[in-house]
């Protein structure tokens, strides 16, 4: 009965007409709720993608720093861009540690002609699509620290 009173208060005479057609009213209410859920899911899906893109960029950054003594962040702003759009301020250190650990485990090739090199780009691409990164990213984004905003 309380629900009926809320509906009548919010929608007035229109609601009285719609009560005669309950199925239309229920359809309207449930379709609105579904739209909000869909928007939230799309935003979360984008944030997961951006976080994985950030991890890929960090993977290349760590790999190139160690091998070429190049600070990628001085010549490319992708890492900071992904950190900003995915809002990773509360969780980036844990993610970075995970990525660094991965880059340190990239194996030397077994082919003799390729000795002294490592497949950094291939490994970072595979890492970006890996199940272990997917699980970590989803876990980190559920953490309350993932909602921390950068203070200027």
Image (cartoon, rainbow, N blue to C red):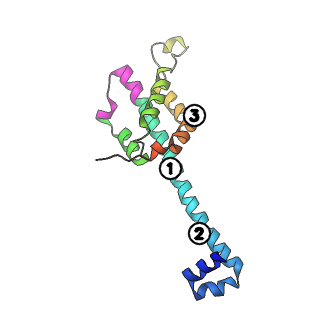
Q: Quadrant of the N terminus?
A: bottom right
Choose top left, top right, bottom left or bottom right for residue 36: bottom right
Using the image, tell me which numbered label, if any, was put on residue 46. 1
Q: What residue is disc 2 on?
A: 32
Foreground mark, 3 or 2, reads 2
> What is the magenta segment's predominant secondary structure?
helix
Helix, strand or loop for disc 3: loop
Helix, strand or loop for disc 1: helix
Q: Is residue 2 magenta?
A: no
Disc 1 or 3, which lies upstream in sequence? 1
Bounds of the magenta span?
61-74
At 55% across and 40% down in the image, what residue appears?
139
Disc 3 or 2, which lies upstream in sequence? 2
Choose top left, top right, bottom left or bottom right for residue 67: top left
At 54% across and 32% down in the image, what residue appears?
126
Residue in the foreground of this view, choosing between 20 and 81: 20
Rounded to the nearest whole Å, what is the CA distance between mark 3 and mark 2? 35 Å
Rounded to the nearest whole Å, what is the CA distance between mark 1 and mark 3? 17 Å
Question: Do the CB atoms of the residues marked 1 and 2 lie less than 8 Å apart?
Answer: no
Disc 1 or 2, which lies upstream in sequence? 2
Choose top left, top right, bottom left or bottom right for residue 91: top left
Helix, strand or loop for disc 2: helix
Residue 51 point in image, percent of width and height: 47, 41
Instruction: Report whether 4 appears left or right of 67.
Output: right
Residue in the foreground of this view, choosing between 75 and 139: 139
């Amino acid at each position: 009965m309380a629900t009926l009173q809320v509906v009548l208060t919010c929608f007035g005479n229109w609601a009285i007409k719609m009560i005669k057609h309950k199925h239309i009213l229920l359809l309207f209410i449930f379709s609105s709720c579904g739209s909000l859920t869909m928007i939230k899911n799309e935003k979360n899906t984008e944030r997961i993608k951006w976080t994985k893109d950030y991890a890929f960029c960090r993977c290349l950054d760590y790999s190139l720093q160690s091998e070429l003594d190049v600070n990628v962040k001085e010549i490319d702003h992708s890492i900071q861009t992904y950190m900003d759009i995915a809002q990773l301020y509360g969780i980036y250190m844990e993610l970075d540690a995970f990525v660094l650990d991965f880059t340190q485990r990239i194996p030397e090739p077994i082919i003799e002609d390729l000795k002294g090199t490592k497949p950094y780009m291939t490994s970072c691409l595979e890492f970006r699509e890996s199940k272990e990164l997917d699980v970590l990213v989803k876990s980190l984004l559920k953490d309350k620290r993932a909602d921390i905003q950068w203070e200027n």
